[in-house]
Amino acid sequence: MITIPKETAERWGYSGFSDFFIPGKAFRAVFVVLAAAILFCYAVGLHGMASGYRNLYGVTREIPWGVLISGYVFCVVTSTGLCIVSSVGHVFGHEPFMPIAKRAVFLALIFLVGGFSILLFDLENPLHMIWFMLSPNLRSNMWWMGLLYGLYLCALSVEYLFLLAQNHRMSRLAGFMAVLCGVAAHSNLGAIFGMLSGRDYWYGPYFPIYFVFSAIMSGGGAILFFTCVASRVEPEIMNERMERAMKAVCKLTITMISVVMFFTIWETICGFVSPEKYLTLSVFLTGPYAYNYWIGEILCGLVLPLVLLVRSKGTDLRLMLIAGGMMLAGIFFMRYDFVIAGQIVPVFHSLGVEEYRSLLTYRPSFHEIAVVAGGLCLVAFLFLSGERVLGGHRLQKHEIVPPGGFICPGCGAIHYRQEGESEEQSLRRYHGFRAAAPPNAERETARR
Amino acid sequence: MNPQLDQGAGPRSDRWSEVTPLERRTFLKIGLSITGLLGGGTLLSVASIVNKAFTTPRTFTETYPYKPHYAMVIREGLCIDCELCAKACRETNHVPDYGYRTRVLTKITSDAIGRQREFIPILCNQCNDPPCCRACPVGATYKDPRDGIVRMNAEKCVGCKTCMLACPYDARYFNDQKHAVDKCNFCWDTRLSKGQKLTACAAACPTGARIFGDISDPDNVVYKMVHQIEKVVWVLRPECGTRPNVFYMKASHASPWRLQRQAEPGGGVRAAGKQ
Ligand code: SF4
Ligand code: SF4
């Protein structure tokens, strides 16, 4: 068993692995179910790996990327989004976002791990990955994906360790690197698809850009969802500052949903005038993927969450929980449809030959679904363990309220008292009831 | 139509490099520039140096940087869908039954007068700008610097399948036995590197729908076929900017080349004589 010095453990909010076993019956049951599911799914995945994917996976020569790649994209999109949203506060200094950083960075890490675990079962020869180092192809987006996500993983881990150690200067620096690598890696992931000139649906600069914005949306949704779940596990994590942070994240998420809607609308309108793209589009609007599109992507992923979040006013945790959950489900559909959509039009469709008259079909097999489910269960399991073992990612008192400051009961922000001033006087000063101090002095303090 | 019909003089029919002086002049006229566009099965512009200004400049390969620069001409109308090419490929290159390196597609034009069926053989185009090679993270697929053939190094292949998506011609499949992606390499390992001059498919095609050769050599039949001003020559999906080395054209009765099996040059298998 690893022993961690008491002081460090305290700082981390870590109080021993025994915490794992205290929780109530229901909680323990969830743990057991998740653990069993993970074991089962990985057993299925390993069986697939051992006996060859061709017979067990639903992917074909024409549609070589299936639900595994969708699951991977889903996980890494969410990870990047979490990293970006958390950086608003703890890297770029926008105070209301600060309290969510610890949990968000932790989630970003486990989503990345979950994503990689799915991708592993998509590669036919994972051991040959050594050639990424020995024989790099610098013109390949896939190679850059390996490098950038590798760097991202490192930066994120360092950022998280410093966050735990409460070294805020270093964690800020590492966080900045993580955001840089994350955005680069992520837009490059979009470019893997966007630079395939033979695939009309994907080709173009749209997806690299869209990916980053939709990542922020996913990140926002994930923070709302997971914080709400965490507050059910341990209601104590909610405090005034956390509530204020949730309000801010909720606002950001609403904005990003609108932005993604805007993207989607123009993507659709443009699709109407390009014959090849229209083919794909019609599959979504009226064809076999209409349910995925209208119910999964549009209703669950965008419209309902938007309505719910607006109605929650950033304070109703129950509504935010539902909205966040719906978003995550809807976003999974978005990724799935995105990956499949680029492949269902056969490359020789325009040739007008008999063999490629109709669109191609893909149906995920049991093995593929199991591997994706395994990855997602792993994320859920790690998340719950994190909540338990790391004390709900709670910030320590001095992290929440720095010396000399206090939480404003009115606006929830942190205000600083001037010397010899009572809390009430300072409140008046901040909110301009009647300036008790000259305005210059006030600005000075605010800057502190 | 009888594909075996020979409009040229009988005796010279198996000498592939022979052309009339008139034709030689025409080749010189167009030089190395050939442009054309086939979009969605419809001809948009025909080959002529004038059109060069109006079509995308990178549609065709216009210079031949490799020596030999292997290329194939598919004379579309001659294919009778006997699939002997695919069979020969399977046997020569040990292609499993769940995959293929080449296949023959069928196109039906039901409102055409007379013949309504056309067969279009497809295979890897050994692109001059191969998107598959750009996509591969580890360089497991690469363009050979000498002969321009796009080949695989199975040892390196990670199996990410990006190249399968990058190829605009669906020319790649994953081979379980090799544990790597597999594709047509103009029979490099099985025939060309062993001194034979034709690919298995070209040697097997009974009608001469597939003609294989070195397009950098003005005396070669492939060069001559592609550089005819009165012929429309096109490539598949030119909009992808891959600059393929497999050319398509219609064979006609006015063709100076016999409409039959290509013979292995230099006293190889005299397939033509066997018929
Ligand atoms: S499947 Fe193999 S050859 Fe194709 S891109 Fe991946 S590593 Fe390269
Ligand atoms: S046809 Fe496909 S496999 Fe062949 S070189 Fe071009 S892109 Fe690569």
Image (cartoon, rainbow, N blue to C red):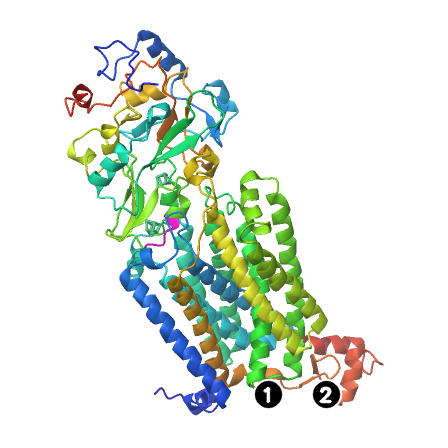
Viewer-proximal residue, A8 or B127?
A: B127
Any magenta on residue B160? yes
Between discs 1 and 2, the one toward the N terminus: 1
Viewer-proximal residue, A130 or A396?
A: A130
Task: Give the chain of mark 1.
Answer: A
Relative to A242, B63 lies left or right: left
Q: Give the amino acid at mark 2.
A: Glu
**Picture residue at 67% right of the left edge, 83% below the top:** A240
Q: Position of residue B174 (x, y in %)?
A: 31, 50
Residue A419's tag is 2
Residue B269's tag is none
Q: Quadrant of the N terminus of chain A?
A: bottom left
Relative to A108, A243 lies left or right: right
Q: Give the amino acid at mark 1.
A: Glu
**The magenta stretch spans which residues?**
B159-163
Q: Quadrant of residue A237?
A: bottom right
Asked whether mark 2 and ligand 1 are closer than 8 Å, the reply comes as no
Q: Name the residue under label 1.
A: A236
Disc 2 is placed on an element classified as loop
Please identify the dominant SS of the magenta region. Answer: loop
Q: Would you place residue A102 above or below residue A185 in this image?
A: below
Q: Would you place residue B152 above or below residue A5 in this image?
A: above
